[in-house]
Image (cartoon, grey):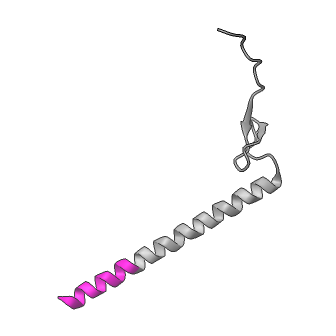
């Protein structure tokens, strides 16, 4: 087969930049954590706006269907 590679220490990878970090950490630095949180907040805001638009469209379509009958 071949020589077994040396075992790596228990680790994880940064959720933003994929750098190796200790297993109990999610980010390699505060700047990566801040960047992750900014992206998460932007995604949540976009989802909220989308839901509001869908709700408004459903209300408008429902109102027009009542007046068209």
| 56 to 24, vertically: above or below | below
16 or 1, nearer to the observer: 1
List the single residue furthest toward the front: 1
- Tell me the quarter of the image containing the N terminus: top right
| Left or right: 7 in relation to 1 | right
Q: Residue at x 45, y 77 (%)?
A: 53
| 9 to 45, vertically: above or below | above
Q: Residue at x 64, y 60 (%)?
A: 40
Q: Which residues are magenta?
A: 57-69
* Quarter of the figure with residue 63: bottom left
Q: Residue at x 63, y 66 (%)?
A: 42
* Quarter of the figure with residue 18: top right
Q: Position of residue 56 (x, y in %)?
A: 41, 80
Q: Position of residue 59 (x, y in %)?
A: 35, 81
For the stretch drawn in magenta, what is the main secondary structure? Answer: helix
* Quarter of the figure with residue 57: bottom left
- The stretch drawn in magenta includes residue 14: no
| 9 to 14, vertically: above or below | above
| 64 to 1, vertically: above or below | below
- Tell me the quarter of the image containing the C terminus: bottom left
């Amino acid at each position: 087969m071949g020589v077994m590679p040396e075992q790596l220490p228990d680790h994880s990878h940064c959720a933003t930049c994929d750098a190796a970090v200790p297993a109990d950490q999610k980010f390699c630095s505060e700047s990566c954590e801040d960047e992750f949180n900014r992206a998460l907040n932007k995604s949540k805001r976009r989802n909220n706006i989308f839901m509001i638009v869908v709700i408004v469209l459903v209300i408008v379509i429902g109102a027009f269907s009542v007046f068209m009958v």
